[in-house]
Image (cartoon, rainbow, N blue to C red):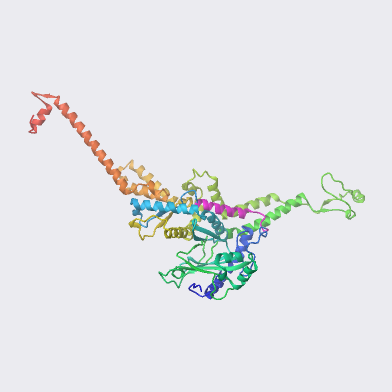
Amino acid sequence: MLDPGAPKKHFERRLSALRDERFGWISHWTDLSDHIIPRRGRFLTHQSQDSNKGDKRNSKIIDPTGALASRTLASGMMAGITSPARPWFKLQPPDLEMMEYGPVRSWLDQVQQRLMTVFARSNVYNVLPVVYEELGVFGTGAMVVLDDDEDIIRAYPLTIGEYMIGNSRRLVVDTLYRELQMTVGQLVSEYGLERCTPATQALYRQGALDTWVNVVHACEPNDKRIANTPGARGMPYRSVHFETGAQEDQFLRVSGYEEFPAMCPRWHITGTDVYGRSPGMEALPDIKQLQVMAKRKAQAIDKMVNPPMTAPASLRHQAASILPGSITYLDISAAQAGQPAFRPAYEVNPRVQELMIDIQNKQADVKSAFYADLFLMLANSDRRQITAREIDERHEEKLLMLGPVLERLHDELLDPLIDRTVAIMARKQLLPPAPPELQGVELRVEYISMLAQAQRAVGTSSIRDYATFAIGLAGAKPDVLDKVDFDKMVDNYGMMIGVPSDVIRTQEQVDQIRAEKARQAQQAQAMQMAGAAAQTAETMANTPIGDQNGLERVMEGMGMPV
């Protein structure tokens, strides 16, 4: 019997409570999915059997502006926050003075490089855009990072509606319950036939391997943890899998995690809400209105091109056509009356131009809600020349609005991702031995992505302005430069713009270089003074004074033998 540390009723009760918490969001998420990204979302009940149906789901989309804007948001966040093409984070000790010590800096650089290699080898960079898109549309994204024998780590994206989350007392997500569907064949292959319910075993023996079965995966803090105990009972987080409708205490798998394996970022949180709000929610009314306006525009143009017609009753059973070159035989009495046999049922002259302008305004509102103008600026600019400073100057108000979102992403997505990956690498002994100064020390993560640097551009501009002001003032009062610590200024500026640490020399190296320069300057000065003295002596030796020369007279005056 598998022992999860809690009875199955505990997980079923909590599953029911989390369903109730999620219930109020389902209709909103469904609306967002229908009008923006129809293939996202699994809005299932525990009895549904439609996990992978390929039915049409975009019937409510006529104008695709919302879908394209959400795609732009996801791509822009990927490029601006976690681009695989450039470093987007740095590891630092809690005391920045330790960065002046060469072994500490070298070890941090090695760990950072190995982390970037692990991320590049795994599928993390394929999963993050999915998380960003769901985050922008639904307000909540989720992925699970697990240990992997081939790629060190493996990331699994979750879609809205198939999972439920819960907060800790600190309002940090620490609970994930997931309802998923697996075929009978998948269940037996993953967990073994003896762990499955009798109903599943019967289906397997009948050969119904492709029948769908509902499964629950629960991961939560292990309140029954026994520290230093091997196995699931000693893990900080417990994890269980079971079939819905299984007998009491019948689990497919019981395991645990040293770290919470799920990253569940929220775009914006109101109070103690578990799930987040999103740009998609703000844009949804405009997106719905766009569908109506696009339909009305198409109807108006259609009526202009192919208007509804009227005809005499005598032509009811006669061949008639309004195509170019065709002939319709008219009723003579109608022709004699001076009335055309065919004519529009009513005058059609819609103001399509005004409607187009209104549609364009709504499209602009949707794009603005998804920050498409900011991210398209990143995509359309020459990446070799664009700088964080330029982004800051051109879109300062957008960056101001993105600031809280970036901070939340750092806290709820990137920090847990890096912590989880470092812990897995440490357990696999893939990290170099840490220097004594960093033993048992919790490291800091500094984000140096393009958007993170743009957020800090205000700080770098103040440093530049201060340096320019001080240097300019030094023209009138040179000793004012004594107030400026240029070494600290260079170090701080380098950290703000994400300069690699191996580019900046340590204070010890700087002191050695300056000491060598001072020694060389002293030698040069001594040689210069010696040369000047030799020249003076030569001049005095060639200057006669009585029966002596100037050099002899000076030596005699000093009591030296001539």
Residue 164's quadrant in the figure? bottom right
Q: For this rendering, which residue is in front, 425 or 24?
A: 425
How many discs mark residues in the rendered view? 0
Q: Residue 12 magenta-drawn?
A: no
Q: Main secondary structure of the magenta part?
A: helix
Q: Position of residue 296 (x, y in %)?
A: 71, 55
Q: Is residue 408 left or right of residue 186?
A: left
The answer to whether residue 526 of the structure is visible from this angle is yes
Q: Quadrant of the C terminus?
A: top left
Q: Position of residue 453 (x, y in %)?
A: 45, 51
Q: Is residue 535 left or right of residue 274?
A: left
Q: Position of residue 514 (x, y in %)?
A: 29, 43
Residue 31's quadrant in the figure? bottom right
Q: Position of residue 272 (x, y in %)?
A: 50, 67
- Residue segment shown in magenta: 59-82
Q: For this rendering, which residue is in front, 501 or 256?
A: 256
Q: For this rendering, which residue is in front, 317 or 346?
A: 317
Residue at the (73%, 54%) spot, across then down:
299
The answer to whether residue 81 of the structure is visible from this angle is no
